[in-house]
Amino acid sequence: MVLGATSSTAHTLRRFVVQYGVYVSLGLLLIAALILTPNLFSEQTLTVLLKQSAQLGIIAIGQTLTLLVAGLDLSVGGVIFMTSVIIARVSNGVDSALPLAIGLSFLFSAVIGLANGLLITKRRIPPFVATLAIFILVQGAVQAYTRGVPGGFVPEGLSVVNQSAGFISIPVVLWVVLTALFVFVLRKTPFGRRLYAVGSNADTASLSGLNVDRFKIAAYILCSLLACVSGVVLTGYVGYVDRFIASGLDLDAIAAAVVGGTLFTGGRGSVLSTMAGVLLIQILSTMALLLGLSIQTQFIIKGVVILAAVALYSLARTD
């Protein structure tokens, strides 16, 4: 009887860690920030922190979708850089040409997502290799197009993304709206439920009549489109073309999803938990900056947090 009660308690604790661990961790981190770096809660710092979180968070939604189907996308950095170049070159600083530039960015981004999906599903290339190859291809194509010198002018109209009311800005509102949209899609629609089914067991899903390849391709197209959205936001935020505009964001987005509890093996995860993971990583980085820690120390802290999260979730899911 005692053994059964102990086993039941352990099972309940594991479920709690899996479902709410990232939120508890975020709460504890906020308490630590209040003690160690109270200036983090100033309006100016919060505004910058939330804008950066939104830029990362939009990409992380897409990475969550690919992880749900047991994949990942390393090409998002190339998509963001390409988006920035297209906006600057096509519009050349003219506001009236901005819709065309953004439209072309979305079109090319969808093609990149389709290419990723086809390589992975039809040619059976591992996601890491396929998306890395596409990233290199996109980077090379953009470099060839710009002859190694990204130029052009970002229209002033795109600077609207920098507008804010208090610490709430347009990128933050966009991030929250997209998160809410994909929470609904994943939890309440047949597409979302089937996406989880494909990630949980592709063979079983196929035997149930689902077109597994189609759902995987859809996940990669959505991931690229979301990266394009982030690229538009980042370009407006920076205000010029920068080849390093997306440096590190691809891996940070994967890290945020993993810290939020999304499995690399697919079939389990939540964009809401990913949002908490994004905030956790961004707050940690901001705290490290405010404490004057070196960049090397910041990388170490981030690595330890990711390893700890993966280890904790693995232990919690052990039956």
Image: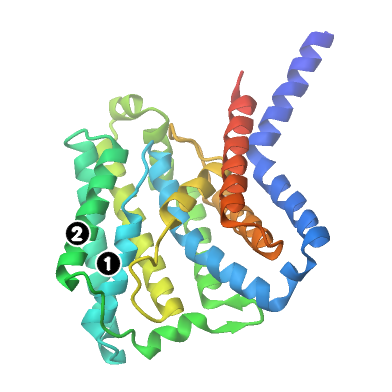
SS under mark 1: helix
Residue 64 image label = none
Residue 18 drawn at (x, y percent): 63, 35
Residue at (28%, 31%) from the top-left corner?
209
Residue 228 drawn at (x, y percent): 34, 65
Circle 2 crowding by C-alpha within 10 Å: few under 14, some 14–19, many from 20: some
Residue at (57%, 56%) from the top-left corner?
295
Residue 76 drawn at (x, y percent): 34, 56
97 or 268: which is nearer to us? 97
Q: Where is residue 40, by image quadrant?
A: bottom right
SS under mark 2: helix
- The vertical placement of 7 against 297, above or below, is above
Kindly identify the amino acid type of the residue bearing the numbered disc 1. Met
- The vertical placement of 83 against 152, above or below, is above
Location of mark 1 (residue): 82
- The vertical placement of 202 against 261, above or below, is above
Q: CA distance from mark 2 to mark 1?
A: 10 Å
Residue 140 image label = 2
8 or 104: which is nearer to us? 104
280 or 171: which is nearer to us? 280
- The vertical placement of 6 against 204, above or below, is above
182 or 28: which is nearer to us? 28
Q: Where is residue 78, by image quadrant?
A: bottom left
Q: How many marks?
A: 2
The N terminus - image quarter:
top right
The disc, 2 or 1, on the residue closer to the chain's N-terminal end is 1
Kindly identify the amino acid type of the residue bearing the numbered disc 2. Gly
Q: Are marks 2 and 1 in contact (CB under 8 Å)?
A: no
